[in-house]
Amino acid sequence: MTLAQTVAHPLRIPLLRGHGFLIVAIIYAGLAVSVIYPLLAVFVQAFSEGAGLSIEKIQEVFTTPNIIEAVFNTLIISVLTVVMAGTIGVMLAWLVARSNMPLKRILDPLNMVPFYLSSVVGALSWQVIAAPRAGLLNSLFAPFFDTPPFNVYSVGGIALVLGLFYTPYVYLFTLGSLQSMDASLEDSARMSGASKLQTAIRITLPLSAPAILSACILVFVTAAGIFGVPLVLGVPGSVHTLSTLIYRAINEYPADFATAAILSSALFLFTAIFTVVQIMILRGRRFTTVTGKGYRPRQVDLGRWRWPAVGVNTLYLLFVIGPFIALLLVSFQDAWTGAFDWARLTLANYHKVIFVDAIAKRGLINSLFISTIGATIAVAVCMLLALVVHRTRLPGREGLSHLAMVPVTVPGIVLGLGFLIALITTPIYGTLWIIMIAYIVHYLPTGLRNSESLVQSVSRELDESARMSGATWRGAMWRIVVPLVAPGMVSMWLLLFVTYIREVSSSMMLFTFGTETISIALIQIMEYEPYGVSGAFGVLQTVLVLACVAFIRQVSSPRQSNA
Amino acid sequence: MQGFHIARTLLAMTALAAAAWTTVPSALAQQPPALAAITDSAERARVEALIEGAKKEGALSWIGVQIEPGHAEPIIAEFKRYYGLNDLKGEYTYAATGAIVTRVEQLLKAKRNNFDIVWNASWAWYKDLLKRGEIMQYESPHYAAYTLSDKHGMSQKGYWVADAYAFAPVYNTVALEKHGIKNFNPTSWKDFVDPRLTGQVALIDVLISTSAAPVLDGVVKVMGNDWLTALGKVKPTLHSKAAQGRDWVGSGEFAVAMFNSPKDALSLQQRNLPTKQVFPKEGVVLIPFAPIIPKSAPHPNTAKLFVDFVRSAYGTQAMMNAGSLLFFGRPGVKPKYPDVLPSSEEVKAIPFNWDTEATNATIKKFRDRVRAVGIGSKS
């Protein structure tokens, strides 16, 4: 065998030689147990009640009026969320990427802030300002309206909060696409007489359509399965979604696992269909936005609309950050009466959260443990998978990538229920590890996509050169590829860390006393403490996450620049 | 000579007193207050054995509703002092009624129960646990004094005696005035279905809550079906947890919260909010609230001692003083906040049979009646 042939077969390494099939089989088995088995457990539970198949139960569930209503609510909330997040996200991305809007350097990172914030805390904040009667906004507008104009305890309220918090997803996807777009297409349109607006609508946006569509379907699927926000804002107004009904079925007495499993299966199918649609749409269309020409896309001159554009972007940030400021005010009040009252100023809420409520401390410690260890394991697993898929020729390696993407279609609450049903009688139940594994599995697609991009961004020539110089496969990966993608791995770790800290859907099913996460602790505290105490905990949670993000960015930035 | 004798006698007495001063208190200090209060030798031996067992176990894990973490802490501290268990690690977990049922059930299913005491208000669940043999049989000697618990049918011989809490309306006088309702001085459940209150009433979600549904059912039994119809007409907004109702009425979001406990009413009063609670003249449904010991309790001796403590006259008063606003199942507990909480002897209880009137079937049937009058539907 020549040297070139050795390089052409990167799998042929001493460690793996002859064991390729076995290695792939082991990875398949691991993924099957962690991804497929919990889903199967849900399906089996849904279709069997007692000994046999229970079609009657399924019929009964889907003819129940409040379940039908919940299905519609879920659909409407998801659509409204997509419309809102899509509109704002695309608009902001275009303003930042393709216009000469002032203050872009400040606004760009600020537009990503909602990504780091917990939507549950966001929901709590919106309660403060848009509760039908005692909300700040309603108090403000009370003299002008007969009935309160805002009601956050509604389908619209839930969609508003979700839309605001999922805007960064669309923003990020679209921004990347717009920034890497070939401007010559737009130039051609302009030269052909199209106005700036016509060019933006007819050329720029269609070219970004795959990215926008991808983001929108991700938002749709996530919104359909989200649990925390509908719990906080939906339940008080009797607005139920599939996720809150699944939770209710498990939490009523006696627990109705069959209904929960049937609803979970329906929710899974609901989200899976949309994901498949996404894949089909993207497969059928080819868009070339990056042509390889090395110039920056041209900036559109907004003229007199430059500062109004800043106003629009600021308004979005105000909608996100404003309620948090209101929550901050509430956290310093001994009671909330709809307006800030200096006579009610207190630090007692913070004292209670920090020194009295053991669950708050426990939630904080547990979340830091799960997020730190979990994100580290996830990065390692995802990198390994990406290397196996893209840097080996093991048989069936492409299938690993597809299998690992399955959780993208599974809402967190469904996955949590699957893990609960599958693992309740094992020693792992009741530990932090079950929650950690659920998180890793749930966000495996996010980690894997990132890892694949990182690995693919490193030219094969580099590790192949190392192999030609006598390095083993493992040595080439460890010494060449991994150091090159290390900054990206740090970013990925941070992404997963923040995602795990905010997560609530799967842990809501899996926590037990002593294994509460920070978001569960917040929901538990809201069960009995006044707004002020919940607000104080929400503020602390937000500050903690932002501090962690800032710290990790600070720590990792020199390494990034070196790289 | 006589002077010397007197001096010697005085010296001897002083020495004796000094000896007594140093030895007697140390002997007394070694004896926990609980043992000092026991005169019966057999009972003393029993408690001593439990204390010894508890010392070896070294921990107590307790989960409950109603008693908030800030109130549980002094109860555990007092328990440790009372039995001389200074090194005991006491841990309290507060959770909602439904959450306790769900999580403890899951722990039992996983054979991973780590609670010594479960203190919940879920009668049907307790009965199921009893049927399944999941509750440890234990008849504390203090159960005999729980005559009010027996009278209201809240005791289970050999397993538990209960205290109770009750839901009663809380209203915000400022919010009412804002809506043009002045001098609202309710005395009856009837006053809370006044048409002027339409859109101003918050009601705990009786379509979900397993404790609130029987309570409303009990009130309807006394007030009649017309009252339920009238309640439907004021279009109450349902909320999932009592704390939500408390915060809504406190902030003025709603002028009336139909079902809140005295604990919630006190919390509002202590924060100087313009709210009042009324116990209607027709009575309230007492919700049984009892500590049980799971059969799988990891620290059974400590659990039994703890049950002894919280069922004793001393312990119940300590609980009341710590802020547990309950209707205790034994007479003689002095309310700490008499203007918020009537005594157990004074409160008018609506007769309610938890065995027959709070089954899943009866609750389901009642919920259908509630839906029929429009409660729970959006309008």
Image (spheres, rainbow, N blue to C red):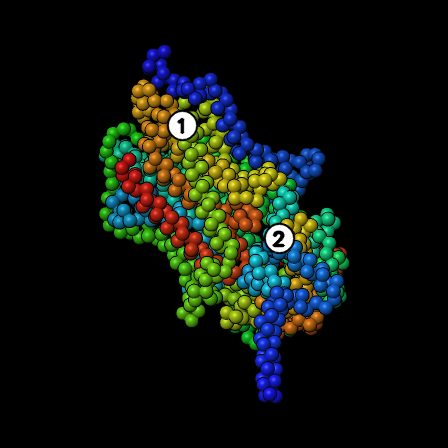
Say left or right for B265 vs B145: left
Say left or right for A121 vs B32: left
- Quadrant of the image occupied by residue A282: top left
Secondary element at tag 1: helix
Q: Which residue is mark 1?
A: A387
Between residue B298 and residue A315, name the one nearer to us: B298
Chain letter for the residue marked with disc 1 in the picture? A
Q: Which residue is mark 2?
A: B57
The residue sitting at 51% across, 39% down in the picture is A438
The spot of residue B219 in percent (x, y) is 69, 64
Q: Amino acid at mark 1?
A: Leu
The residue sitting at 48% across, 38% down in the picture is A440
Residues at marks 1 and 2 on the same chain: no
The spot of residue B230 in percent (x, y) is 65, 64
Q: Does B222 sit above or below residue A285?
A: below
Q: Does B352 sit above or below residue A240?
A: below
Between residue A79 and residue A482, name the one nearer to us: A482
Q: Amino acid at mark 2?
A: Glu
The spot of residue B110 in percent (x, y) is 63, 43
Secondary element at tag 2: helix
